Image: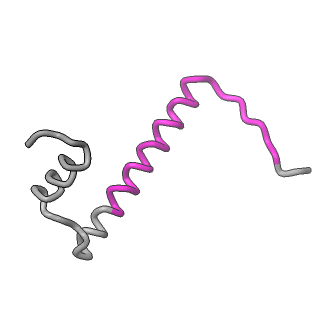
Amino acid sequence: MSGRAVVVQDADSYQNLLDRVALFESLAGIRKSIAEFEQGQGMPLDEAFTQLRKKHDLPD
């Protein structure tokens, strides 16, 4: 056997699976951000907005 398998499921179940994966990826990103902040790798919010405005040529 080659280790390959086929799984058949209805569209709603598949979408639910995709939604859960997206949620877990978001949670992992949040955890990473919290860890970085706790290590002093964050920046003040006003500085972050200033950088975003410059990067995307947005008005103040």
Residue 15 within the segment the image draws in magenta:
yes
Seen in the picture, residue 33 relative to 26 is either above or below; the reply is below
- The residue lying furthest to the top in this view is 11
Q: Looking at the image, which residue is at 44% across and 49% down?
A: 24
Q: From this viewpoint, which residue is outermost toward the right?
A: 1
Residue 29: image x %, image y %? 37, 56
Question: Is 20 displayed left or right of 14 in the figure?
Answer: left
Q: Quadrant of residue 7?
A: top right
Q: Give whichever of 53, 33 is nearer the camera.
A: 53
Residue 53 percent location from the top left of the image: 18, 46
Q: Is 10 inside the magenta-drawn segment?
A: yes
Q: Position of residue 16 (x, y in %)?
A: 50, 32
Say if 30 sits above or below 43 in the image.
above
Dominant secondary structure (helix, strand or loop) of the stretch shown in magenta: helix
Please identify the residue farthest to the bottom as the structure is shown.
Answer: 39
Query: Which image quarter is the C terminus in?
Result: top left
The stretch in magenta equals: 4-32
Q: How many marks?
A: 0
In this rendering, would 3 be left or right of 22? right
Q: Is residue 34 left or right of residue 45?
A: right
| Residue occupying image coordinates x 22% and y 67% | 42
x, y (%) of residue 52? 21, 49
Taking the spot 53% from the left edge, 37% from the top edge, the residue there is: 17
Residue lying at 13% horizontally and 57% vertically, measured from the top left = 45
